[in-house]
Amino acid sequence: MAVKRVEPTGERRDYTPDQIFFSTTDKRGMIVTVNSTFVELSRFAEDELVGEPHNIIRHPDMPGAVFHIMWERLLAGQSMMGYVQNLARDGAYYLTFSTVTPLSEGFISVRSAVTRPDLWEPVSRAYAHTRALENKWRRGGMPRAQAASQGAEDLGARLAALGFPTYDDVIRAVVPAEVDERRRLAPPHAPPTAPGQPLHEVVLAIGAVDRELMTLRARYEDATEVAASLDSAQAAFVVTLEGLEDAAAAAADAAATVGTAAPAAAKTAQAALSLAVTARKDLAPLAPLLAEVRGIVLDLRASLALSVLHNDMALTFARDAASGSSVGDPQGTVVLLGETVSASVRQGEVMSQRVREELGQVVASIHEAHEALMSFQRMLTNWRHVVVRSGVSQRLGALVDPIDSRLSAGLTEMNDLDRLAQRCATLALTLESAALREAAEGLVIAARRL
């Protein structure tokens, strides 16, 4: 059904945090399924939406850059999340926190009210600047696709200035923040059902998934904190190791001046320097590894938040279906949403496995650095004895204190890293998500029995 072009009126349509809505599209972006809240907010009838391109609700104030980024991510098999201003049939606009996730036959978009204006407002200003540039380029004759592509570069730079170096960083920040705040403002509540009613087992299964998601998310909040602690502790330790290496180098240089009188002292000092260099080199790979661990932990945190949103969407639709207010095919939609939750959980499980593996690498890297540091300590003790036996204490003894001071600081910081490594090892054991996977599979089974 052809729909006339809608002119924006500037009127804003607000709605409540408990109004979650969704749509599905095929791979071309043509709408396949909607729910009643989408119909209500958009002011389009269901049959006016189904079969139409999803950009039927695109607001002209939205920069093409956002959709350029979206399609790049979706075609690469990645989800897209962020803020979108939509246009209703009557010309009003409504703001959404939007997520788009690939499905086997297309995409599902789950949307909710913007609950974090502190995040939305700076992003909206970036959107406005980028859209103004795109309009200027278009007036100059630039093709729409090229303007959107160049706009994506401009928007990326503006988002980086806001503290989001990549679009992944936008997702890492916005998704958990919006999901958590929405649930704080509108805690999910199940519709009343009784054993034997069609939706009863589905609602119970949704509740089981939610409990497992909350348990796992709490563990990943801890993992995020541990990753940040490791990062700062490792940075301080690197500085100490560099100082230790400098002090050992000074001792080796001084010992070389008495090499004829005390060759053992010179040789031992050089060996100690080599161990200090080894300790620093052993720890060097930890920095990029920690950055990678922290990134994947934040990715998983966002992925789990997306699973929460999908599960809340399933519960919201179950409420609509139970009250008789749903549109379309309620049974098929319940199955679709259950499968969406299960797919989200499986994606999170892949990330979880990677986090566990990388936490194991962190533990191994810290252990290697500790072994090198302890070897240095033993070599330093031996050097002291050699200096005394060689009769050059007066010439070399003053060099011991700076090394001792650096070594003492290094051992203290190493103990801090060891404790954090133990937390990593413990976390790796608790991040297994079999119970969540089983709960998600139970939801799919319950939905298919309707």
Image: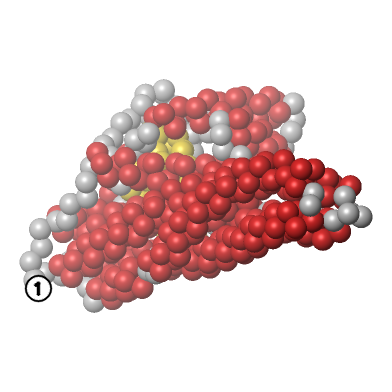
Q: Residue furthest right?
A: 260
On the question of residue 442 being in view, the answer is: yes
Tell me which corner region of the image, top left, top right, bottom left or bottom right, holds residue 130: top right
Residue in view at x 70 percent, y 58 percent: 385
Residue 170 spot, x, y in % from top left: 52, 42
Quarter in which the C terminus is drawn: bottom left
Label 1 sits on residue: 196
On the question of residue 230 being in view, the answer is: no
Q: Secondary structure at mark 1?
A: loop
Residue in view at x 37 percent, y 24 percent: 11
Residue 95 spot, x, y in % from top left: 40, 34
Residue 431 spot, x, y in % from top left: 40, 65
The one of 368 and 325 positioned closer to us in this rendering = 368
Residue in view at x 37 percent, y 34 percent: 116
What amino acid type should be assigned to the residue bearing mark 1? Gly
Q: Is residue 417 left or right of residue 320?
A: right
